[in-house]
Image (cartoon, coloured by chain):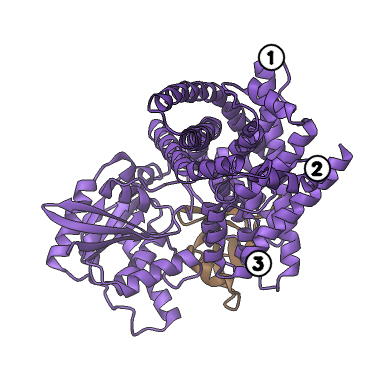
Chain colours: A brown, B purple
Amino acid sequence: MMYNTCKLSELPLHQTAVVEQMDRRDPVTARLIQLGVINGATVTPLFKSMLGDPVAYQVNDCVIALRRSECSGVTVRTEDDGHAV
Amino acid sequence: MPYKVALAGNPNVGKSTIFNALTGLKQHTGNWTGKTVESCEGHFSENNEMYSVVDLPGAYSLSSFSREEAVTADCLQSTSFDCVAIVLNAGVPERNLIFALQVLSMVPHAILCLNLTDEAAKKGLQINAGQLSKRLGIPVVSCCAAKKQGLREVKRAIALVCRTKQENAFFRHLQPLREDAADRLLHRYAKQLCDTCVTRTAADRKTRRDRKIDRILTAKATGIPLMLLLCGVLFWLTAVGANYPSGWLSTLFAAVKERLVTVCSAFALPKFLSGIIIDGIYTTLGWVVSVMLPPMAIFFPLFSLLEDAGFLPRIAFNLDRCFAKCGAHGKQSLCMMMGIGCNACGVTGCRIIENDKERLIAVLTNTFMPCNGRLPIIIAMLTLFFADSPNGWVSSCHIAMLMVAILAGCVLITLAASKVLSTALKSQSPSGFLLELPPYRAPRLLKTVTRSFLDRTLFVLGRAVAVAAPAGAVIWLCANIYIGDASVLAYCTDFLDPVGRFLGLDGVILTALLLGFPANETVIPIILMAYTANGTLTEFTGSEQLYSLLTQNGWTAATAVCMIIITVLHFPCSTTCLTIKKETGSLKWTLLSMAIPTITGVVLCAVTAHVL
């Protein structure tokens, strides 16, 4: 199977992906982990705010708003054809 | 000794709702993360045993980030509770279970409450409480606190644990582990629990409807107009609705006053005594209640409906970018909205902002939001001086639009001040936004409205009795104690008059603002008292008389504009100042928080006065 990896902040809307790696040095990471953004979790960008940033993500069973800068440290994996893994 | 019980859990899972249902108290609740920032205590009894309950602020984790979370972690660590009721949002099982496991590893005696089960069912989630209970070694109860379902079981479970002192299966499980290892184990264990105890079916229409509303509320084309429209409707209803009860109340107070005068003369009370009681205390009280109460008793119930529905986090979400550009945090808009209710509450609410610098900015700029004591002054100014259309509907729309514009102005000033502060303050790494957007919840219409109405009424009446009554007595004394041929009050107002004139106001208004420091509600009554003090006191039963009194004393539309500016932009009231001192722990920041709005207001007023 072919995988694509990209930063969470670059993931297009409505495309589900799996968290692959997180930047351990980033202080935001610990907070993200508490909110359920951990390796292996599925995330889907749902909608952008009025001015484009932050973006609301579906993580596990809830909706969390994250700024672009916060999710630049998170690498996610999608299948090549753009469907959910 | 009562058993000690604590309620803990992730933010916005309904801890305060359960707390209220258990204890019969009336803690404020709302559909957003960070509504409760201070712990609160209450009691209930079950089978003749007393239980004292602490409602802890919500936390995502016990390795704390924000202040409210630190409160929760400290409290759980330092107090030996007989039972900790861990409240879970059954709709978000995995993340909630991670927190639950953290708590279970720290405290021996606990129960689990699966709250919001109705919402979870709509999401297609079903949790097997029996299985979960077996795995964790504690009672697990399903409930739906908002509908008062399952609360008896919660009480019984708490009583059982308090009596038997049964220890949970996870206690001290994590202690030998390093932090990241503990974290990994928690996540793995929570996932396992979810896999065995939670069954999933497809989500229903509700979730899809939520997303649709979200898309409309957050789209560029519809988001801002909708927010402004909502705000406008709120103020329109307030402006239209407040007029009638205001009129009734002032008629009532005037009628009672006549009786009081008769009674006083029947008992042949000395003039001094009847003056201080009737013209001082009673009249001020009457004015505060009839002018300030009706707008607030209409505005806040409506506002709490929006709060319960879950709109507030969306507004913060939409505005975050603007705040980020000014070096502040989007959650600041949540504190600002609380500030409209009461700046002191808004300042305390700033605890939800994790970053120290951003929190300080939010605390220092909170007074730019006109609070409960100042909003009615603005509405009154607009009603008296700018609603000149003969058609009531047109003029009320007019007021609503002006009100929205003023509020937008307040937001702009807040943003500008935040920008200046963030450049001036030492830089720190910026924090993230990380705000949970809860599902929309249909507000319990009648309950929310009546509770908010009663709360507001009690709040305003309480302030009226505690502050307005003594203020009335003091101001009457000032107006009636003569030194030479002028009263003390006249000396004050004459002294301040040149400054007042320079700002487009007058000495009386400035005196009122200074004397209104304990509570801004008293500003208008003090002004009226000062204007009427010299002549015989006339009755005010409607806005026409108020208007003519003000214009007789030289008020024009320009004065009203300056009055609105200085109302929004001056030092916060004493309660807010004390709260700022408490929250920042520094006299320097408190003084700065008084200086910033005052200087801005003085400059703006002076400019306006010379332009108009």
On residue B391, which mark appears? Answer: 1
Q: Of tags 3 and 2, which is closer to the observer?
A: 2
Q: Quadrant of the C terminus of chain B?
A: top right
| Rendered location of residue A25, percent (x, y) | 60, 78
The lab-note entry on whether marks 3 and 2 share a chain reads: no
Residue B497 is at least partly visible in this image: yes
| Rendered location of residue B514, percent (x, y) | 64, 50
Spatial CA distance of label 3 from label 2 is 56 Å
Q: Which amino acid does label 3 sit on?
A: Ser
* Relative to B271, B89 lies left or right: left
On residue A72, which mark appears? Answer: 3
Disc 1 element: loop
Which residue is rendered at x = 44% and y = 34% of the image?
A: B453
Disc 2 element: helix
Q: Read off the chain for label 2.
A: B
- Contact (CB < 8 A) between labels 3 and 2? no
* Relative to A35, A47 lies left or right: right
Which residue is rendered at x = 45% and y = 38% of the image?
A: B461
Spatial CA distance of label 3 from label 1 is 56 Å
Q: Name the residue under label 2.
A: B501
Image quadrant where residue B132 sits: bottom left
| Rendered location of residue B225, percent (x, y) | 69, 35
Spatial CA distance of label 1 from label 2 is 34 Å
Disc 3 element: loop
The answer to which of B150 and B428 lies nearer the viewer is B428
Q: Which amino acid does label 1 sit on?
A: Asn
- Contact (CB < 8 A) between labels 1 and 2? no
Q: Read off the chain for label 1.
A: B
Q: What residue type is labelled 2?
A: Arg
